[in-house]
Image (cartoon, helix red, strand yellow):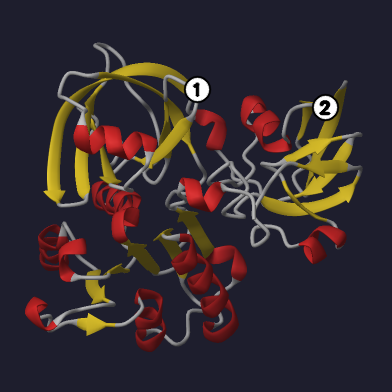
Amino acid sequence: MTFQVTVEPSGRQFSCDEDETVLAAAIRAGVGLPYGCKNGACGSCRGKLLSGEVSHRAHQERALPVADEARGFALFCCATPHSDLVIEAREVLGIGEFPIKKMPTRVAKIDRVTDDVIILSLQLPANERLQYRAGQFIEFILKDGRRRSYSMANAPHLDEQLTLHIRHLPGGVFTDHVFNTMKERDILRFEGPLGTFFLREDSPKPIVMLASGTGFAPIKAMVEQAQHNRLARPITLYWGGRRPGDLYMDALCREWAGTVPGLRYVPVVSDAKPEDDWQGRTGFVHQAVMQDLPDLSGYQVYACGAPAMVEAAQADFVARCGLPPDEFYADAFTSEADLAPP
């Protein structure tokens, strides 16, 4: 059976098959429901079920606690309909303007910048161009049909090649291949662009950009986009890692701080050792933001990195710093362990 889904308050409508998730149907119809992982881990697609019935596929408890589901909330990446639905969600305007495509790509360069981070450069087919918003991601389609998601680390106007920042997760099917057996000129297949994490340029508010580890990749693309568009809003970039070496493009960020008007850079290390000779900020990166900016009521925040960092930042910024909940935009970098059912 096919059911009708109505999105409030926009009034947009789309059809959804009974064995299809609400989010998948929305993406197919070009309706911009917010989302991140698409696998029930990050909670970005959570919204209210105003009428109708759904069932939820396996998902993380933290993304949709049982008590919240009982109160009428739904996780649209995992929810399949049993009737026509009316849902409440903050629709992302303009998300359907760039077509989602499947295409092959050739590995152009494999640059190992640290022991566990590779910058992977991809060459698109001749006469092909991937249109996307800085901050979005692609999904590699593996031979067995499984998928792995990575954000573009370069702004769209720098599209001679796509660059991705890939951290090695030992035992990971894809990252083991990238770090151990992948070669230049190998052919990969991906789908994109995907995701609703991108810079909202229609606001005058100053911006906090918050990254941990390779969560820096889409943040880098956003900064390049802001610079290209001559965005006049102040940007404060916080980048956190366990050790100084985890800030693998620290020199670029320091260069931005000296050349990009209105941009301030704050590196933060949580587990510095004596041999690191680290003279900068220490502790959790989101707490550094709170120390510097105890009142976030007039800001927009863009956060990307480990789910624990993103969740802590969202909760603390809203509860303790007055950040409006709808001014927190995030992309949690979920691993296979994060995607497993609880």
Relative height, residue 102 to residue 56 (above, below): above
Residue drawn at (57%, 54%) of the image? 42
Q: Label 2 sits on what residue type? A: Glu
273 sits left or right of 317 in the view:
left
In the orientation shown, which residue stands out farthest toward the top? 126
In the orientation shown, which residue stands out farthest toward the front? 171
Residue drawn at (13%, 40%) of the image? 111
73 sits left or right of 159 in the view:
right
Relative height, residue 291 to residue 339 (above, below): below
Q: Position of residue 84 (x, y in %)?
A: 90, 34
Q: Position of residue 209 (x, y in %)?
A: 36, 64
Q: How many marks?
A: 2
Judging by the rendered image, the residue that carries numbered circle 2 is 18
Q: Label 1 sits on what residue type? A: Gly
Relative height, residue 178 to residue 304 (above, below): above
Residue drawn at (84%, 35%) of the image? 81
Q: Could you tell which of marks 1 and 2 lies nearer the N-terminus?
A: 2
In this rendering, the label closer to the viewer, 1 or 2: 1
Along the viewing direction, whichever of 191 and 59 lies nearer the viewer = 59
The answer to whether any part of residue 157 appears in the image is no
Quadrant location, the N terminus? top right
Helix, strand or loop at disc 1? loop
Along the viewing direction, whichever of 107 and 291 lies nearer the viewer = 107
Tell me the crowding category of disc 2: few under 14, some 14 to 19, or many 20 or more residues within 10 angstroms, Cα based: some
Residue 165 badge: none
Judging by the rendered image, the residue that carries numbered circle 1 is 145
Tell me, yes or no, whether the two marked residues, 1 and 2, touch with CB atoms within 8 Å: no
Q: Give the CA separation, mark 1 to mark 2.
A: 22 Å
- For residue 94, what is the image quadrant? top right
